[in-house]
Image (cartoon, rainbow, N blue to C red):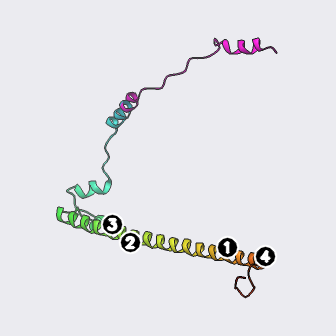
Amino acid sequence: MSSETDSNDFDDCSSLQPMKRARPFEDVVNEEQKAKRNRTEVISSIRAALESEQPQHGILNYFKKATDSEHAAYQARMSEDIATRMEEKGWREGKAKQTKHALIQRRAKERKQAQCRREKDREILAGLRSPGGTKH
């Protein structure tokens, strides 16, 4: 093959198809908004039963619609519970961090001790140090 035929292979662009253009972002948003408008709102059966004027029966005897004060008390309990959980989580994470740091320090100390031990053994073999531990 000659270099002339290689360059001609790339010059022929007639077989290339034009690229499809992506839809604009606005079209996607508009379709989502249309879908939201066409949705029907469904009220849960429990809410519908609690809001109805008919006498309650069965398990609904144990439920009632919460008053504003009850709802506020519930929110306060939940926020206190969440705060307690976050505090405990922070304590656990801190403890784990301390444990990991102590482990890293212990391993570093052990590595340094092993390095010193190897160096001492090398010096003993080379005759620079006596086996009792004193240098010559």
Q: Residue at x 77, y 14 (%)?
A: 3
Q: Nearer the viewer, residue 74 or 97?
A: 97
Quadrant hosting residue 94: bottom left
Give me the disc on residue 88. Answer: 2
Quadrant hosting residue 127: bottom right
The amino acid sitting under disc 2 is Glu
Q: Nearer the viewer, residue 62 or 131?
A: 131
- Return the disc, 1 or 4, that comes first in the chain's sequence: 1
- Graded by Cα atoms within 10 Å as few (under 14), some (14 to 19) or many (20 or more), the crowding at tag 4 reads few
User: From the viewer's perspective, is the residue at label 1 or at label 2 nearer?
Assistant: 1
Q: Is residue 64 visible?
A: yes
User: From the viewer's perspective, is the residue at label 3 or at label 4 nearer?
Assistant: 4
Q: Secondary structure at mark 4?
A: helix
Distance from label 3 to label 4 (Cα)? 66 Å
Distance from label 1 to label 2 (Cα)? 41 Å
x then y, percent, for residue 45 = 32, 54
Tell me the quadrant of the picture where the N terminus can be found. Answer: top right
Q: Please report contact status of discs 3 and 2: CB closer than 8 Å, yes or no.
A: no
